[in-house]
Amino acid sequence: MKSNNMLSICFLISVIALSCFTVPAYGQWIKHFIDQDLTYAHGVCVADMDNDDTLDVVATGWGANDVVWYEAPSWTKHFIDQDLDGAFGLDVADMDNDNDLDVVATAMDGNAVVWYEAPSWTKHTIDGSLSGAGDVYIVDMDDDDTLDVIVAGWYADDVIWYEAPSWTKHTIDNNLDGAHGVCVADMDDDNDLDVVATGFSADDVVWYEAPSWTKHTIDNNLDGARGVYVADMDDDDTLDVVAAGRVADDVVWYEAPSWTMHTIDGNLDGAWDIFVIDIDDDNDLDVIATGWEANDVVWYEAPSWTKHFIDQTQPGARNVDVADMDDDNDLDVIATGWFANDVVWYENIVAVEEERGSNQPSVINLAHPFPNPFSDKTEIKFSIGYPDRITHSSYGTGSAKGVELKIYDAPGRVIKNFALPTAYSSVPTIVSWDGTDNSGKKVSTGVYFVELTTTQNKQMRKLLMVR
C-alpha cells in the first residue's frame, strides 16, 4: 500500500514532468469469503458463467452433495445440483457447443460422472458406475470437435476417457492403485494428447502415451501422490510435470525427458493441489499449492522456490484456481477449505510506486475475448493508456515499443504472436484470432490464455476453443 512518503515523492516527480504510477508488487493478500457454508468444500473452477464480463466461481461440496456457482460480484449462490452423492471433481466447458458454459462433476460416493447442461442445469449421466469417481479433465481427446472427459476412479484404480457424444468408455489404465489426479497434454510432441496421472496408494506419477496408452513411470516413490500439473518449467520446449505428495508432504517437479526430480518443498504438510503460472510477472513459471493438513495456501517463486504464504489459516486447504478476479492486472488465487467449509479468494494487492518515462504505457485494459468459448473466430479488444506528464491521467498517444499480445496453451507455451499497430491511444484496438498457431495450423480444442504485456504491466484472459 502507498505510504505518505512515497506519495510525496510521486508529487515531486510530477512537478518536474515525470510520470509516476503503480506497478505490481507481490506477497500481500487480502482474503475474501465467497461462501462459508459449503460442507467439505472441494472442487473449484473460475469462469464467466453468465457472460457478463465478470469472473464467477463454481465449486463442489463433498459433504453437502452440492454443485454450486457463485455469481460475481455479490457471490449470489446458485445451486446446480443438491443431490450429487459426495460431489468431488469439477471442470467447466461448453459441452454441447451452444455458447454457454456447462459443468462436469463427479460423485465420489455415488460412483458417477455427470454433466449439467446450462442454463437449466439438466443433469446428464456419463457413467453411473465408476467407483470413487474423482478428478476430472475436459478435452477433445480424439480431435473430432467434441469435448471428451477424462476421469480418475480412486476406488476403481482406473483412469478412463469417455468419448463424446455417446460417452463410450475407454480404459487407459485399470491398475493405478488409488488413481487420483489427471492432466492432459501432448507429452511426446507427436500431435496427439497423452494423459498424466497420479496413484495415491501406488505412490506413482505416470504418463500414458496415446493412442496405445503405453504406461511410462515418472516416479514410483512419491508417497501419497495427489495433485499433478503439466508445464514447461525450464523453458526447454519439453513438457515437465509438477506433483504433490500428500503423505510425503512434498511438492516436486520432474524434468523431462529424464524425469529428474527437483524438490520445490519437502515440508508442506498434506500437500494436495497444484497450479502452475507466472504469478510475479518475471517470465518464469511459479507454483501455487495447498497443504491440506498444514492449512496453508502458498506460492513458490521460481527459480529459487522461495516459499510465500498466501494463507496459513485455511482449515483443510484443498483445491485452487488462479485468475484476475478484480480486473486489476494481477493474478489472484481462489481456494476451497475442506474443514473450513468455505470458498475464498485471495486478492493480490500492489504496493509500490516507481518512476517511469512519460511515454511508457501505465494502464492496460484487456477485455474478455468474445465470443468465449469460440469455434471459428474470437475478438480480442484492448486499450493502452499513456500518462499525461502533469495530471497523470491515462490519455494521449504513445509508442508501441514493448507492447506484445500472445496466446499461450495450457502448459505455458507461446503458440501465437500477433503483429500489432505501431502506436496506441486510449481508443480500443481489436485483434481477431482464428484459432491458428504461428505456423497457420488450427489448434486443438482446449484452454488457452491471451496475454497483453507492456514494459510495466501484464494482463491475462482465459479462452476456451471448441472445435
Image (cartoon, rainbow, N blue to C red):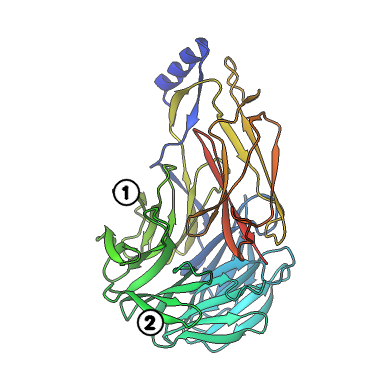
The image position of residue 9, as x and y in percent, is: 43, 17
For residue 207, side relative to residue 294 (left or right): right
Q: How many marks are shown on the rendered structure?
A: 2
Dividing the image into 4 quarters, which one contains the N terminus? top left
Residue toward you, 36 or 467: 467
For the view shown, which residue lies furthest in the top direction? 16
The image position of residue 330, as x and y in percent, is: 50, 43
- Name the disc covering residue 425, or none: none
The image position of residue 79, as x and y in percent, is: 63, 68
For residue 285, side relative to residue 111 (left or right): left
Q: Is residue 258 above or below residue 285?
A: below
Residue toward you, 116 or 315: 116
- Name the disc covering residue 178, or none: 2
Residue toward you, 340 or 218: 218
User: Within 10 angstroms of label 2, few (less than 14), some, or many (20 or more) residues?
Assistant: many
Q: Which residue is mark 1?
A: 303
Query: Circle 1 — which element?
Result: loop
Number of the front mark, 2 or 1: 1
Q: Report how far apart the C-alphas of labels 2 and 1 lie in the structure.
A: 32 Å
Identity of the residue drawn at 63% across and 76% down: 115
Identity of the residue drawn at 57% across and 57% down: 448
- Give the mark nearest the N terminus, 2 or 1: 2
Q: Quadrant of residue 45?
A: bottom right
For residue 74, side relative to residue 323 (left or right): right
For residue 134, side relative to residue 287 (left or right): right
Q: Quadrant of residue 148?
A: bottom right
- Please indicate, yes or no, whether residue 35 appears anywhere in the rendered image: yes
Dividing the image into 4 quarters, which one contains the C terminus? bottom right
Type of amino acid at the residue the image marks with label 1: Pro
The image position of residue 446, as x and y in percent, is: 59, 64
Query: Circle 2 — which element?
Result: loop
